[in-house]
């Protein structure tokens, strides 16, 4: 079977492709010009092109579904070589920038949310991805290919500034080796040049893996899916809390190297009548004391058969106001692409349902 070329950093490829400058050229073809066949790499000698074509695949997955939301976000469902499917979402946000004369120019800001596993072992009670159990890790190449295909599908230039969030299906830190490899491949200046500062890893809080990630010192941003402020409730929502309780997560976060200008993000999924009270907000403020942090409130997005409900807008706003009044940075994640079931796992489930 052929190997997937998107699995490799330049350094890896230099082990078997010589001289070195060829690797640079190949990277540019793969990530900047986005060719789909080695035979089209015009400045590479013909016999080398053929050898590469015999040895490597450039694409291993197909887009099987694409849904465009009213707000412009696009949700993709990819079919992997073994028939399993994962989701990725291109989120578009309007951004303001000022021209030299002071007039405003509107820019489109892109963020891509990628998956790291097929399914997930963590088993959170509110998450649709968890319902199907765990199937397998994605390879580094499969993580990378989601982005490459989304660039391709939207004609994004390689120098386009794009953010990556590892917030799709799966627990990224449960697939740390491949995740770290993908982060390095994305940031290569001869490739997509997406700096680690523009990449955010979201985790359910595997404290020991947060420590390992810290040691790798990749320069990425960290997001913690906290969702509850006491162990009893968190354990009910996220069984992983039995192995790694809130105190152990906070300890790992305190030791995490954070880019000076950045903060650790705490995600707080608000569920109606479960964690939407001001008492929780109060405890959250206490918990974050001394940590350079910002909070992102997320509306629970219900799905068919889910036991939880979406909170009221008034309660979410009240929760936010409490935090802001206490000096904690806090945003509400607008339900981007709600009409296309943007909470990850939901498109895949819909698609599996249709097939049955
Ligand atoms: N496993 C990692 C990253 C993927 S989950 C983690 O848990 O952080 C990404 C985000 O989707 C998490 O913050 C999770 O809380 C959120 N999510 C899961 N189910 C959701 C739902 N039904 N509605 C809204 N957000 C949801
Ligand atoms: Fe896994 Fe994240 Fe879903 Fe929890 S929320 S089951 S960790 S994907």
Image (spheres, rainbow, N blue to C red):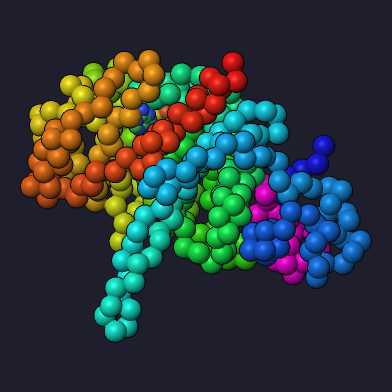
Image quarter where ligand 2 lies: top left
Q: Position of residue 4 (x, y in %)?
A: 73, 45
Q: Residue at x 23, y 47 (%)?
A: 331
Viewer-nearest residue: 169 or 197:
169
Count of residue discs: 0
User: Quarter of the image holding residue 19?
Assistant: bottom right
Up the image or down, 124 lies above or below 113; here it is above
Magenta-drawn segment: 6-27
**Residue 216 appears anywhere in the view:** yes
Q: Residue at x 56, y 29 (%)?
A: 118
User: Quarter of the image holding residue 246?
Assistant: top left
In the picture, the quarter occupied by the C terminus is: top right
Answer left or right for 204 relative to 89. left
Q: Position of residue 194 (x, y in %)?
A: 51, 59
Up the image or down, 145 lies above or below 344; here it is below
- As drawn, the residue found furthest toward the front would be 70
Q: Does the magenta portion include 156?
A: no
Q: Does the magenta portion include 13?
A: yes
Q: Position of residue 355 (x, y in %)?
A: 60, 20
In the picture, the quarter occupied by the N terminus is: top right
Q: Residue at x 71, y 63 (%)?
A: 29
Answer left or right for 116 relative to 41. left
Q: Position of residue 256 (x, y in %)?
A: 35, 47
Q: Main secondary structure of the magenta part?
A: helix
Answer left or right for 305 relative to 133. left
Up the image or down, 267 lies above or below 161; here it is above
């Amino acid at each position: 079977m052929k190997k997937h070329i998107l699995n490799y950093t330049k350094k890896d490829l230099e082990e078997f492709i010589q001289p070195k400058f060829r690797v640079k050229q190949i990277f540019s073809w793969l990530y900047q010009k986005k060719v789909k066949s080695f035979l089209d790499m015009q400045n590479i000698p013909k016999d080398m092109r053929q050898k590469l074509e015999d040895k490597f695949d450039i694409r291993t997955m197909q887009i099987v579904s694409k849904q465009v939301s009213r707000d412009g976000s696009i949700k993709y469902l990819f079919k992997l070589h073994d028939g399993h499917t994962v989701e990725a979402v291109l989120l578009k946000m309007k951004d303001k920038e000022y021209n030299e004369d002071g007039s405003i120019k509107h820019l489109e800001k892109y963020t891509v949310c990628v998956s790291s596993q097929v399914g997930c072992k963590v088993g959170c009670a509110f998450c649709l991805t968890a319902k199907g159990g765990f199937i397998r890790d994605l390879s580094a190449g499969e993580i990378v290919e989601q982005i490459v295909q989304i660039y391709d599908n939207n004609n994004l230039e390689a120098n386009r500034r794009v953010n990556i969030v590892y917030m799709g299906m799966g627990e990224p830190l449960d697939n740390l080796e491949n995740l770290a490899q993908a982060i390095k491949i994305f940031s290569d200046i001869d490739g997509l040049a997406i700096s680690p500062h523009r990449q955010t890893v979201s985790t359910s809080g595997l404290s020991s893996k947060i420590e390992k990630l810290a040691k790798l010192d990749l320069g990425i941003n960290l997001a913690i899916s906290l969702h509850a402020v006491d162990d009893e409730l968190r354990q009910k929502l996220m069984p992983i809390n039995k192995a790694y309780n809130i105190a152990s997560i906070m300890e790992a976060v305190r030791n995490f190297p954070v880019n000076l200008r950045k903060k650790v993000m705490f995600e707080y999924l608000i569920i109606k009548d479960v964690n939407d009270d001001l008492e929780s907000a109060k405890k959250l403020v206490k918990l974050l004391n001394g940590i350079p942090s910002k909070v992102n409130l997320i509306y629970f997005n219900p799905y068919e058969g889910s036991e939880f409900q979406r909170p009221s807008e008034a309660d979410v706003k009240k929760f936010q106001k409490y935090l802001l009044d206490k000096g904690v940075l806090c945003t509400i994640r607008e339900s981007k692409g709600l009409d296309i079931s943007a909470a990850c796992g939901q498109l895949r489930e819909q698609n599996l349902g249709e097939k049955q």
